[in-house]
Image (cartoon, helix red, strand yellow):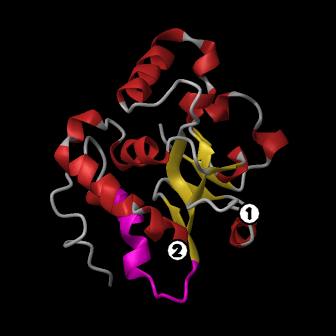
């Protein structure tokens, strides 16, 4: 049993989420040190086919993490109220609209680079200090820190939400399905 209480103290989830969403930030502190890289996966994800083992060798290009672009970021080109709302969120995080924004539902993390960057402590501190600034909680706090400097993963590793409506499921053959909606 891993105890996150001391690490995520003062972090209150929003809506339907539990405190478990914050745990990905602190896995580097609780997993055995023999793990140089790990994959954090949300509970609302289904591993639909083999392929996660590829992430052990995925080239992070010296970055602390790899993640897939968030579907809303990819759908900005469609315009509409949801796109405008999401663009406003990103601007409030200090991100340019062209800065890639990732979904934290599945992240491959290089333990050493993650610690060196201080992402966990800083994201937690930012969220604790101003939770209203981060509508998507730790995901927003991380994106505000990373500022697009992550290794992008194929949507096959985080096939989410509206992607199911595109007809691309057969073509992409997702490894991980993410039921964000």
Question: Could you tell me if residue 13 is visible in this image?
Answer: no
Instruction: Look at discs 1 and 2 and give the one toward the viewer.
Output: 2
Of residues 42 and 37, the one nearer the viewer is 37
Q: For marks 1 and 2, give the CA distance.
A: 15 Å
Determine the residue positioned at 38% across, 33% down: 93
Q: At which x and y percent is residue 38?
A: 56, 72
Q: Where, by quadrant of the figure, is residue 1 drawn?
A: bottom left
Residue drawn at (46%, 88%) of the image: 32
Height in image: 71 above or below 18?
above
- Residue at the outermost left position: 10
Mark 2 surroundings within 10 Å by alpha-carbon count, few (fewer than 14), some (14 through 19), many (20 or more): few
- In the drawing, what numbered circle is on residue 112? 2
Horizontal arrangement in the rendering, residue 154 relative to residue 33 (left or right): right
Q: Tell me the chief SS of the magenta region.
A: helix
Secondary structure under the numbered disc 2 in the rendered image? helix
Label for residue 59? 1
- The numbered mark, 1 or 2, whose residue comes first in the sequence reads 1
142 in the magenta segment: no
Residue 87: image location, x then y, percent: 46, 21
Q: Is residue 131 left or right of residue 71?
A: left
Q: Magenta stretch? A: 21-36
> For the residue carrying disc 1, how many other residues have a C-alpha within 10 Å: few (<14), some (14-19), or many (20+)?
few
């Amino acid at each position: 049993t891993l105890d996150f209480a001391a690490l995520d103290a003062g972090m209150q989830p929003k809506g339907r989420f539990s405190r478990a969403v914050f745990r990905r930030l602190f896995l580097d502190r609780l997993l055995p040190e023999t793990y140089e890289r790990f994959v954090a996966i949300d509970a609302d994800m289904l591993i639909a086919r083999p392929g996660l083992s590829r992430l052990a060798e995925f080239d992070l290009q010296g970055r602390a993490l790899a993640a897939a672009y968030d579907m809303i970021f990819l759908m900005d080109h469609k315009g509409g109220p949801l796109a405008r709302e999401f663009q406003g969120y990103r601007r409030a995080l200090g991100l340019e609209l062209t800065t890639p924004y990732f979904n934290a539902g599945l992240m491959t993390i290089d333990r050493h680079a993650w610690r060196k960057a201080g992402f966990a402590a800083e994201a937690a501190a930012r969220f604790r200090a101003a939770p209203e600034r981060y509508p998507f909680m730790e995901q927003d706090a991380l994106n505000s820190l990373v500022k697009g400097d992550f290794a992008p993963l194929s949507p096959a590793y985080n096939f989410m939400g509206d992607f199911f409506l595109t007809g691309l499921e057969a073509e992409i053959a997702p490894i991980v399905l993410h039921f964000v909606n």
